[in-house]
Image (spheres, helix red, strand yellow):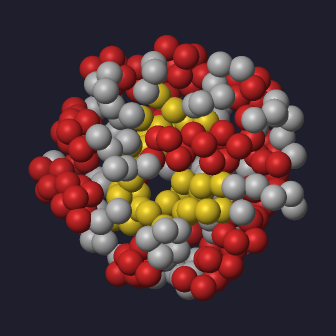
Amino acid sequence: MAAIRAIDTFVNVNMGSMERPDYLVRVAEDYFKRADEIFQDISLGQMLDTMDRCGVEKSVLSLRAEDPSEHVLSFVRARPDRFVMAAYVDPRRGMHAVRALEKVARNEPVVLARVVPFMINLPPDDRVYYPIYAKCVELDLPISVNTGIPGPPAPGKCQDPMYLDEVCLFFPELKLIMAHGADPWWQLAIRLMIKYRNLYLMTSAYAPRYFPPELIHYMNTRGQDKILFASDHPVLSMERCIKEAQALDLREGVLDKFLYGNAHKLLTRA
């Protein structure tokens, strides 16, 4: 593997101890066919070894804003140079979610908020999300929103990227990242990124070998600064995603932007 540098913007280290809804079990068993590897808690040493092998300088670890995992927090406290966090919120919780997000963002190295529409079957232009968006603007905190039909047997219509159109209009300052790709709406997602300066996409849970031609073309042209690498490790292994990313047909300099530069620019907080 050639020497590279990368930031992985979607990593999970506590899937062995987290709640396992039926849809997550089914996708691990039926879709990825590697449930034993997915449902495990990863130690600090294991994660650092994996990152060092892959050239990943920093990982963005997932945790819940209202119930932060001590296991996840232990990583960022032990190695703040290698780990930062993304805080998931349930927007249906209203001001409880807003206050939890603000508290964890002000007290811990949180660089990203997360919402996942399929988990609540509400599209991201629903009014319940707007207080979270407003708080992210206030905190200058980017937010990721899952787009595309989800792998689990769960609602998919709510993750059509078109639902972000009016969100981007109403919150032009909001740095919004489409997560988990945008399949099958890639062309729509790309058109929206061209339209909106602060709309991005991360490739979490989508193996690089399956990137569609239109995404590769966009990465090589107008979208060089718009696409962020992510694995969703261990759902998709970091090793696999880095290796497949290196094999992409990208122009000179684009791979480094994809793997490192775009995330470094967008997710580095003062």
Q: Nearer the viewer, residue 55 or 229?
A: 55
Residue 4 lies, in percent from the top left, at 76, 55
| Residue 208 percent coordinates (x, y) | 76, 46
Say above or below: 167 vs 176: above
Q: What residue do we see at 25% from left, 36% from top?
A: 137
Judge whether 254 appears above or below 188 on screen.
Answer: below
Tell me: 252 left or right of 7: right
Could one spot residue 40 in this view of the protein? no
Residue 267 horizontal side relative to residue 240, left or right: left
| Residue ID at (47%, 41%) | 266
- Percent position of residue 36, x then y: 67, 80
Q: How many marks?
A: 0
Q: Quadrant of residue 84?
A: bottom left
The residue under the point 53% across, 22% down is 193
Q: Position of residue 35 (x, y in %)?
A: 66, 74
| 38 lies left or right of 41 | right
Extreme residue toward the front, this view: 270
Q: Is residue 115 left or right of residue 252?
A: left
Where is 175 relative to 235, above or below? above
Q: Which residue is depicted at the point 81% across and 58% down?
A: 3
Q: Nearer the viewer, residue 270 or 50?
A: 270
- Can the viewer see residue 258? yes
Q: Quadrant of the N terminus?
A: bottom right
